[in-house]
Image (tube, rainbow, N blue to C red):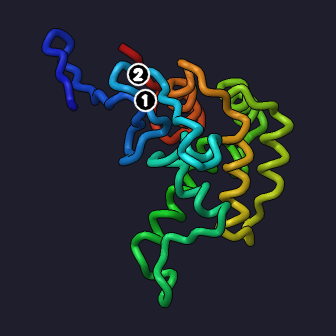
């Protein structure tokens, strides 16, 4: 929703809880009040992976499991395949797993509560020649270390700002 402040003459966009600018998927599954949702462990899936279903991170988790979002045949021309690659790249940027200044990686590590050395090691495993599975596995390593907490959606939004993916978020 775009909101206009008539008193100041400025417009801004309000995103639903869990969403980030320019994304069509949530970063974290949250209730309407912004509380992080936790999946039941009775779903039969890995609890760490189940909580990331239908989020931006689903593409990376599928990649780590070897599930390509493409039909048989012309792999690099399908829209789903390109979407999976784009989502994986966004996840890598969000967690500072791409070539970045160490200060940026350290700031992301502090925001998400993951040891800087763990982010550094995950980033070092990714090269230009890395396939989608390896890139997805690097994201999965970070996701497995994230603890569900009330501040997680806001912390992930701040990581996106640190990565230059969007402006510093304001919370109302």
What is the spatial separation of the Cα atoms under label 1 and label 2, in whole angstroms? 5 Å
Looking at this view, name the residue that lies furthest to the bottom: 73
Disc count in the image? 2
User: Residue 30: which numbered mark, if any?
Assistant: 1
For label 2, count other residues whose C-alpha is less than 10 Å away and answer few (under 14), some (14-19) or many (20+): some
Quadrant where the C terminus lies? Answer: top left
Residue at image mark 2: 34
**Badge 1 local density, few (<14 within 10 Å), some, or many (20+)?**
some
Farthest front residue in view: 42
Residue 23 in picture, x, y percent from top left: 39, 46
Quadrant of residue 164 in the image?
top right
Quadrant placement of the N terminus = top left
Q: Residue sitting at 42 percent across and 37 percent down? A: 20
Element at badge 2?
loop
80 or 98, which is in the foreground?
Answer: 80
Which disc number belongs to residue 111? none
Q: Are marks 1 and 2 in contact (CB under 8 Å)?
A: yes
Q: Quadrant of residue 80?
A: bottom left
User: Does residue 47 appear to the left or right of 126 in the view shown?
Assistant: left
């Amino acid at each position: 929703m775009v909101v206009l402040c008539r008193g100041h003459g400025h417009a801004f966009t309000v995103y639903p809880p869990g969403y980030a600018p320019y994304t069509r998927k949530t970063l974290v599954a949250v209730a309407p009040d912004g509380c992080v949702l936790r999946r039941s462990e009775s779903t039969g899936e890995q609890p760490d992976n189940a909580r990331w279903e239908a989020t931006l991170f689903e593409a990376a988790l599928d990649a780590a499991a070897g599930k390509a979002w493409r039909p048989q045949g012309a792999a690099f021309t399908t829209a789903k395949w390109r979407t999976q690659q784009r989502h994986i790249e966004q996840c890598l940027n969000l967690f500072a797993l791409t070539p970045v200044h160490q200060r940026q990686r350290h700031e992301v590590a502090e925001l998400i509560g993951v040891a800087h050395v763990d982010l550094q090691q995950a980033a070092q495993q990714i090269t230009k020649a890395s396939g989608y599975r390896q890139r997805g596995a690097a994201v999965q390593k970070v996701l497995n270390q994230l603890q569900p907490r009330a501040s997680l959606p806001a912390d992930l939004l701040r990581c996106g700002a640190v990565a230059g993916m969007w402006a510093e978020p304001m919370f109302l």
